[in-house]
């Protein structure tokens, strides 16, 4: 599974604190990005975590041709989805409704057509072509009945990559807690879920770096993520430019089908919720843009955000509802 890689937009410096005999740190590569998991326990759970990653990929990865979602996208109507798929599907339905369709997993066909999916097609779509593809967008046209996915049109393409990485983090968190491990930090490609404290009894602190100066590692602000989840989505670097100079970004507006850039560079969402939730909302906010996101947040105060946007002169600006330190 290759998901949006936050390291393309931010450098996250994760401070793990002093060493402890009971602290275990696991590192690796999954979902198309790197991961780091630190927890306060001496037992190494690497094999169990690898098995969990395998199950998530087998169910939800659009980059694995034999996964359940890939088979469904190819038109296989015999697939009976597993509990992981069903949970992500139902959570996506909820967020799709809450965001009035700005989070939409059926936008995957357009993502592929623009060249940001597994096929790397890199088409320069005309307005007519976008309109034709938009008939296959709309999560309200997809349902889960008796364990099987029902699509209004067989051409509809499901893509849960904007929620699956956060969901993978939640799966790991549940496993750790089932082992009575209640002090941990899980980071996959920049998405984070943390609980309790570090080995030195200090909270889990991460540092966001200014996206306009990411190469220098300049600090933007520090965040206390103990007992919280955080996800960031952005179009700062993951884009392409065609031979005519037109710029296409990887997060599309599911209302219009266009991949045009806005002044909103990134959206970081922090909440005392599962990481899957904040992962999906971060994507939705990038699709909404700055002003619509601000309006949404006035009615949804349980989400804390850090929105970074640029003025016409290139100056970086911040809109935030984040208050915890």
Image (cartoon, grey):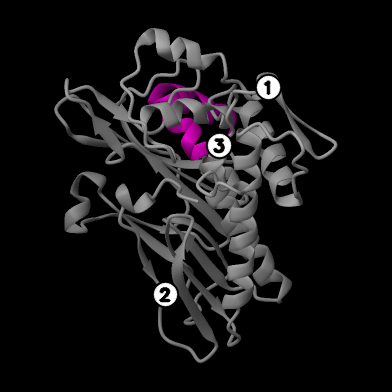
- Residue 16 has which mark? 2
Tell me if residue 32 comes above or below residue 105 in the rendering.
below
- 297 left or right, relative to 139: left
Note whether residue 310 is visible: no
Q: Are marks 3 and 1 in contact (CB under 8 Å)?
A: no
Report the mark closest to the observer, 1 or 2.
Answer: 1
Q: Secondary structure at mark 1?
A: helix
Question: Badge 2 local density, few (<14 within 10 Å), some, or many (20+)?
Answer: many
Report the mark closest to the observer, 3 or 1.
Answer: 3
Q: Are marks 3 and 2 in contact (CB under 8 Å)?
A: no
Magenta part mainly helix, strand or loop? helix
Q: Position of residue 139 (x, y in %)?
A: 64, 25
- 148 left or right, relative to 304: right
Tell me if residue 29 comes above or below residue 105 in the rendering.
below
Q: Is residue 65 magenta?
A: no
- Name the image quarter holding the C terminus: bottom left
Residue drawn 51% across the image and 31% down it: 108
Residue drawn 49% across the image and 55% down it: 31
Residue designated by label 1: 140
- 305 left or right, relative to 121: right
Question: In the depicted view, which residue is nearer to us: 323 or 153?
Answer: 153
């Amino acid at each position: 599974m290759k998901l949006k890689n936050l390291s393309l937009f931010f450098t996250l410096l994760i401070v793990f604190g002093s060493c402890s005999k009971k602290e275990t740190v696991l590192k690796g590569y999954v979902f198309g990005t790197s991961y780091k998991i630190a927890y306060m326990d001496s037992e190494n759970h690497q094999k169990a975590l690898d098995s969990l990653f395998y199950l998530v990929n087998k169910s939800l990865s659009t980059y694995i041709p034999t996964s359940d979602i890939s088979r469904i996208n190819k038109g296989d109507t015999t697939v009976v989805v597993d509990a992981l798929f069903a949970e992500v599907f139902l959570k996506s339905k909820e967020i799709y409704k809450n965001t009035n369709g700005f989070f939409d997993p059926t936008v995957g066909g357009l993502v592929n057509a623009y060249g940001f999916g597994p096929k790397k097609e890199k088409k320069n779509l005309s307005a007519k072509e976008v309109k034709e593809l938009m008939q296959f967008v709309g999560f309200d046209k997809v349902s889960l009945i008796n364990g099987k996915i029902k699509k209004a049109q067989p051409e509809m393409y499901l893509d849960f990559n904007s929620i699956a990485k956060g969901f993978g983090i939640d799966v790991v968190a549940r496993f750790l807690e089932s082992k009575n491990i209640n002090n941990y930090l899980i980071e996959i490609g920049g998405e984070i879920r943390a609980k309790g404290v570090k080995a030195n009894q200090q909270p889990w602190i991460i540092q966001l770096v200014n996206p306009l100066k990411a190469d220098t590692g300049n600090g933007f602000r520090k965040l206390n993520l103990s007992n919280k989840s955080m996800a960031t989505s952005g179009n700062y670097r993951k884009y392409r430019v065609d031979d005519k100079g037109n710029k296409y970004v990887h997060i599309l507006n599911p209302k219009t089908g266009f991949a045009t850039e806005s002044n909103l560079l990134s959206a970081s969402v922090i909440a005392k919720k599962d990481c899957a939730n904040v992962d999906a909302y971060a994507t939705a906010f990038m699709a909404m843009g700055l002003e619509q996101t601000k309006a949404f947040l006035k009615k949804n105060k349980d989400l804390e955000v850090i929105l970074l946007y640029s003025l016409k002169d290139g100056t970086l600006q911040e809109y935030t509802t984040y208050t915890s330190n």
